[in-house]
Amino acid sequence: MSLKLFNTLTRAIEQFRVLDPDGKGVGMYCCGPTVYNFAHIGNFRTFVCSDLLRRYLEFRGYDVRHVMNITDVEDKIIASVAKSGRGLKEYTGEYEKGFLEDFDTLHCARPHDLPHATDFIPDIIELIQKLIDQGFAYRANEGSVYFSIERYRAAGRKYGQLLNLNLEELRVGERVKSDEYDKEAVSDFALWKARVPEDGAVFWPSPWGEGRPGWHIECSAMSMRLLGPTFDLHLGGEDLVFPHHEDEIAQSEGARAANEKPFVRHWVHIAHLLVEGRKMSKSLGNYFTLRDLLAKGFSGREIRFLLLSSHYRESFNFTLEGLTGARTALGRIDELLGKLRDLAGSEKAEPDRTFLDQFTASLDEDLNVAGAWGHIFEWVRATNRLLSENSISPAQAAAHLAAWDRMDSVLGVGAKVLATEAPPEILALLDERQAARKAKDFGRADAIRDELKAKGWTIEDTPKGPKLKRI
Ligand code: AMP
Ligand code: ZN
């Protein structure tokens, strides 16, 4: 058995095959955030699903090189920087820091490379020059350089690999100024944008005059520089299929001879997070940032659980009730893990395969995460039953815990901090409470209980003695 993935390029679920002759290395590029304010949790659905794929590839034994760019120069950024009166780096640096904090809170494994577009200007210029040399790009009078889809197609190249495009209706609502009269055709897109007064101090010299790169070319230049001209996996939200990814293909494949290997082998697109049936987006104003939800008392793992609860190709409706449901579901897992830990004591064992194999079989089917959760909750039910019948040994409990650790290496929801992991100051308070109870000083014992509560811990009195639990 092995992983099958839907490939937007072929519109089919395919066996995942890597370019590496040893079958181990995977080059993976995800279009990263545009850092001009805080990302919303719709954006994070894309990043959490990408993280799931990376973790699953690692679980499956692949050696993944994960690249995620930081878009730190583009139209919206320039407009925001101009309004703020601050420098580009200072402005984007603040939101990049915020983004990475949120990324960590959601337990996303940090990419191996986080390239910034502004650090790749020489690569971008080199790539644009190649496209001019190939005859697919031209400099307009005002100094911008455009990619000509007509010239590209006239040379027998295919524009419209990810989507069947109606070329007459191309590029409506794209991130290109609509009044660019200097273009040969409305469908042409900018590779290099000539400097205009509104750009302020945001410009670089180039062979075509001062200016800045277009958004699409940034990703072509960074991905090929870091992963090579042809690599395994490219991911992004579904809104990036066109024009962003279609343009990335045209730019990257257009810079080399026809009939060479394709730019990317597998394209993976993540469906949108919706709010009341509409895409969560900044422009609609119907969004939550991660920080909004943390302020409501939800945790990173609860939000991650919700974002991972449905298949990545199905759009998913976000609700606060969904988050409450995530809390309950995780509570059931935590409770089982607590019982298993108590029983296993210091026993160690190889993972129990029963549910682990079913979990793997589900994820092998195009990352069927809903199926994988189904097996996990079946495991919770079945194991609770065995525990209530006292028909599970400490070694078996350890095997179940080892299986969970394997599954959680993919899901990344972790487990709640358990009693033994409480910090020393909390453990000292617990001891003090026990002493107070022994001395029948119940007033003091209750006051300590309240103090623990204020610090985020409750005490559960069990037949085996008091246990600490995080609230
Ligand atoms: P941006 O910062 O706008 O470049 O977007 C970062 C990533 O989030 C891109 O891959 C987008 O496709 C993705 N994205 C934007 N809105 C949503 C949404 N509502 N649901 C899922 N992904 C989204
Ligand atoms: Zn991109």
Image (spheres, rainbow, N blue to C red):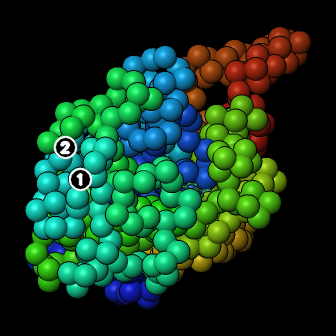
First in residue order: circle 1 vs circle 2:
1
Q: Do labels 1 and 2 touch, CB within 8 Å? A: yes
- Residue 40 appears in the picture as rendered: yes
The residue shown at (68%, 65%) is 316
Check disc 1 and give the amino acid type.
Arg
**Which secondary structure, mark 1?**
strand
Q: Is residue 442 above or below residue 166?
A: above
Check disc 2 and give the amino acid type.
Trp
Q: Residue at label 2?
A: 208
**Which secondary structure, mark 2?**
loop
Describe residue 240's horizontal placement relative to residue 68 as left or right: right
Quadrant position of the N terminus in the picture? bottom left
Q: Is residue 317 above or below residue 111?
A: below
The residue shown at (75%, 57%) is 275
The residue shown at (39%, 24%) is 200
The residue shown at (10%, 62%) is 133
Q: x%, y% of residue 331? A: 71, 52
Along the viewing direction, whichever of 103 and 264 lies nearer the viewer = 264
Query: Which of the numbered marks, if any, corresponds to residue 83?
Result: none
Q: x%, y% of residue 167? A: 45, 78
Along the viewing direction, whichever of 256 and 402 lies nearer the viewer = 256
Along the viewing direction, whichever of 421 and 194 lies nearer the viewer = 194
Quadrant position of the C terminus in the picture? top right
Q: Residue at label 1?
A: 139
- Residue 372 appears in the picture as rendered: no
Work out how far the residue at label 1 is from the one at label 2, CA to CA, in angstroms.
Answer: 7 Å
Q: x%, y% of residue 299? A: 65, 40
